[in-house]
Image (tube, helix red, strand yellow):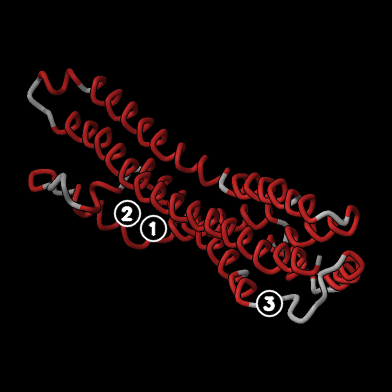
Amino acid sequence: MNRNLLDVLLFSVAVVVVQLIYTIWIDPAAAALTSDSENLDGRNFYVIVKDTEQKICFMLLLWAIALVVREFITLESHAYIFKVDLFEDEDMDRQASSSLLSSIEKLPLEIKSTPLVSVISAALRRFALTGDVHSSAGAIEPALDALAVQNDGRLTILRYITWAIPSIGFIGTVRGIGQAMSQAELAVDGNIGPMTSSLGVAFNSTFVALLISVFIMFAVSMLQRRQDEQLVNIQQYVEDYIIKRVVLAD
């Protein structure tokens, strides 16, 4: 499935799931609590998360979790290749490298498209053309740089979500403060209920948004570290199983 289409599908699922949770569970509970304004506990979970801004933040949270899980699954699905010697008992001279490239092209697409195999192909292709070990070793770094750029691109939406969630929280803050200011006359007359309720919207939206943002930033950091570990493993694999054998063959 197209990557962008899958992103949209995951977002749609997140929206539907969160909307159902609010409709079935949170909204009725919050309505029951707010109906008793005299005994209303502003620190209650349902009161804190009942507003629209918090709902949007939870939608983005669920979407971000789905994106992070997808990326981790992709990374782990490639991890087994590092435990396999793809070129065991193969000669690593210039003539053999061409045949190895042909063998790589015949691999299934899910294996041929892995980052490790793409870097190996770059090193073997350079060695087949030049016959120079140092030149083939030099092909590793640009290939790894390209993979690093690709990994960084995979985090674009997650970085946007990390930025968007606090912004939505601040929008709730501005909205709540604006409502509170418009109800100042009621507070002067002694009815402070509407004003305090609006201020609750302001502070609760920021609180929830920042809390969710911290969690997502942690998840993105863990994902980025795993991506960096993959690049290190690729470099180590190519040096151990390709470059060293080429040197010994010469």
The residue closer to the viewer here, 20 or 172, is: 172
Q: Residue at the location (60% across, 71% down)? A: 77
Q: Quadrant of residue 231?
A: bottom right
Cα separation between marks 2 and 1: 6 Å
The three-letter code of the residue at mark 3 reads Asp
The three-letter code of the residue at mark 2 reads Asp
The three-letter code of the residue at mark 1 reads Thr
Marks 2/1 in contact by CB < 8 Å: the verdict is yes
Q: Quadrant of residue 179?
A: top left
The residue closer to the viewer here, 71 or 222, is: 222
Residue receiving disc 1: 23
Q: Residue 152, position in %: x, y?
A: 59, 45
N-terminal label among 3 and 2: 2
Q: Which mark is residue 85?
A: 3
User: Mark 1: which secondary structure?
Assistant: helix
User: Mark 2: which secondary structure?
Assistant: helix
60 over 182 or under it: above or below: below
Q: Residue 90, position in %: x, y?
A: 80, 78
Q: Residue at the location (16% across, 44% down)? A: 42
The residue closer to the viewer here, 246 or 125, is: 246
Q: Which mark is residue 240?
A: none
Between disc 3 and disc 1, the foreground one is: 3
The residue closer to the viewer here, 30 or 147, is: 147
Residue receiving disc 2: 27
Marks 3/1 in contact by CB < 8 Å: the verdict is no
Q: Is residue 219 left or right of residue 179?
A: right
Q: Residue 86, position in %: x, y?
A: 73, 75
Q: Is residue 189 left or right of residue 95?
A: left
The quarter of the image holding the C terminus is: bottom right
Q: Residue at the location (61% across, 54% down)? A: 7
